[in-house]
Amino acid sequence: MKVASVVGARPNFVKLAPVSRELRKRFDEIIIHTGQHYNYEMDRVFFDDMGIPAPDYHLGVGSGSHGYQTGEMIKRLEEILLKEMPDAVLVFGDTNSTLAGALAAAKLHIPVAHLEAGLRSYNRRMPEEINRVLVDHCSDLLLCPTETAMKNLMHEGISRGVCLTGDVMVDAQRDCSIIAEKRSQILEELGLVRGGYKLATIHRAENTDDPVRLESLVRALQDTGDAVLPCHPRAEKCIRNLGLWEELCRRAKVIKPVGYLDMIMLEKNASKILTDSGGVQKEAYLLDVPCITLRDETEWVETVEDGWNALAGADREKIVRLANSFEPRREKRDVFGRGDASVKTAKAIAHMLEGA
């Protein structure tokens, strides 16, 4: 049997690494890379760092509006799926690549498995929220990372094909954290002391495309005085358009995007993490680092309920206050599984296909 894994952006690559290893024990896997992220820092470095097999197909779609990007992906994916005719298509997370892969497969009556199903922020202004809702409702197998995700699907009337696997990020982080300690030199290269800086990331459109929110976030990072910012290309462009780039670079350590191993080292050795990324929120939790989320809501509600994540939105004063004073309130729970999510994922796909 053949499974096609559709990926295209950094979060997809991280999840693919442990899952691909397990899939290849049971299936012929082909990897289709849409090209949503396409430069080395956002793309190839993850395949290199994490030992992911080279993609069998690279669509080279690149950037563009949501409609253009998703439409081009669907068109090119359909051609490949018709050629390969896989028994199932696996999509990851909530990116435009995820939506395109699910729609292209569903239209061809190829079973769709959605890894990281059931997440909800309940903010329909987020493109990712639209993507994840649509993908969940056209998937045949919904692979949920948490009990909360399963409950979200039940509330929407989705019960068939729902499976609790735990979170594959636990698997990926477990493997890569060990490798990162041996191979990454990012702390030495940047002259950073363990626990002596705050790590920040900004990339979501709700922040980068809103000049008022973005200026407030940039000012907050400047005020913290010890922020390290691996800067997403779109965020850099938007900050430059505001005329704040040079000032930010003087008052924070701004660097290019880094590979996953370097990112793990930056995360696990930060005193705090300030981010609008869903994946980074979860990574902070798994690495025992307090997190301040630069959004008004989160799909990872468990991290907030456990007291390890605080929502700050784009409130400059609140961000700075939390960056200086926020500390977790209690011990963490085991909400994301025990590192066997990729094994459960491969088993669930096999079970679905055997019953087809």
Image (cartoon, helix red, strand yellow):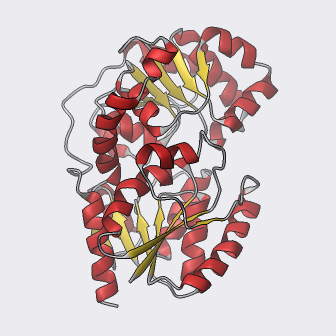
Would residue 164 be seen by someone viewing this image from the given angle?
A: no
Left or right: 131 as drawn, with respect to 75: left
Seen at 29% across and 50% down, the residue is: 171
Q: Considering depth in this image, is 48 or 341 the residue closer to the camera?
A: 48
Quadrant placement of the N terminus: bottom left
Question: Would residue 324 appear left or right of 107 to someone viewing this image?
Answer: left
- Is 277 on the left-hand or right-hand side of 71? left
Quadrant of residue 166 within the rendered picture: bottom left
Quadrant of image for the C terminus: bottom left
Q: Residue at x 35, y 27 (%)?
A: 268
Total marks in image: 0
- Residue at x 33% of width, y 27% of height: 289
Where residue 123 sits in the image (x, y, percent)?
Answer: 55, 51
Task: Tell me where residue 80 appears, x and y as whole percent.
Answer: 62, 78
Residue nearest the viewer, comparing 181 with 101: 181
Q: In this view, does 130 lie above or below 205?
A: below
Does residue 137 appear in this view?
yes
- The x, y position of residue 247, in whole percent, is 71, 12
- Residue 130, quarter of the rendered image: bottom right
Residue at figure coordinates x 80%, y 20% from the top left:
243
Up the image or down, 271 lies above or below 345; here it is: above
**Residue extending farthest bottom:** 356
Q: Where is residue 152 in the image (x, y as percent from the top left)?
A: 37, 62
- In the image, residue 171 above or below residue 257: below
Q: Which of 215 and 44 is in front in this view?
A: 44
